[in-house]
Image: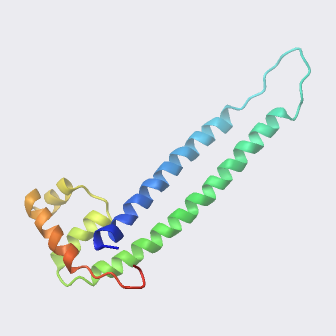
Amino acid sequence: MTAKEYLGQAYRLDQRINSKLEQLASLNDLANKVTTTLTGMPKNPNRNLSLVADAVAKIVDLQAEINCDIDLLVDLKCDMVRIIKGVGNAEYQTLLELRYLCFKTWEQIAVDMNYSIDNVYRIHRKALCAVSIPKSIQ
């Protein structure tokens, strides 16, 4: 695994968490929309309760997945911080932190670091060469 692939994992995991959070919001909306319909015909009184119970079960399962993913993201970011701190150049560290821990765009990084975009790309290439991924992680 290259340094770029390793460092890019956090962004993808963060995207998956955000996607699951959107799914959770959608499930919560659906669970809140479950209502009874009043008609003159007798129906199974447990029907709507079953719908609510199913929605709640899905919500709980999805919340557990999200919590697990968040734990993985926190652990991954801790490892990444350690690896980035191992890079000897403070400028490289800053760029890597902005890109791979804060998920900033190249344009935002260029503005924050007061560099041209081409200079940011050049520094990024050098910074990736300076990153050393331990064999235990690869």
Residue at 31% over, 62% down? 102
- Asked which quadrant contains residue 119, the reply is bottom left
Which of the 4 image quarters holds residue 5? bottom left
| Residue 68 position in % (x across, y down) | 57, 65
Q: Quadrant of the C terminus?
A: bottom left
Q: Residue at x 81, y 38 (%)?
A: 49
Name which residue lies at 27% across and 84% down: 86
x, y percent for residue 4:
29, 68
Choose between 16 and 32: the one closer to the eye. Answer: 16
Query: Is 134 situated above or below 28?
Result: below
In the image, residue 22 sits, relative to residue 99, either above or below, namely above
Image location of residue 44, percent across then percent down: 89, 29
Q: In which quadrant of the rendered image does the N terminus lie?
A: bottom left
User: Please, is residue 45 above or below residue 7 in the view?
Assistant: above
Tell whether 48 sits left or right of 11. Answer: right
Q: Is residue 78 left or right of residue 37?
A: left
- Residue 137 drawn at (x, y percent): 41, 80
- For this orientation, the residue located farthest to the right is 42
Q: Is residue 15 left or right of residue 114?
A: right
Pick out the residue farthest to the top.
40
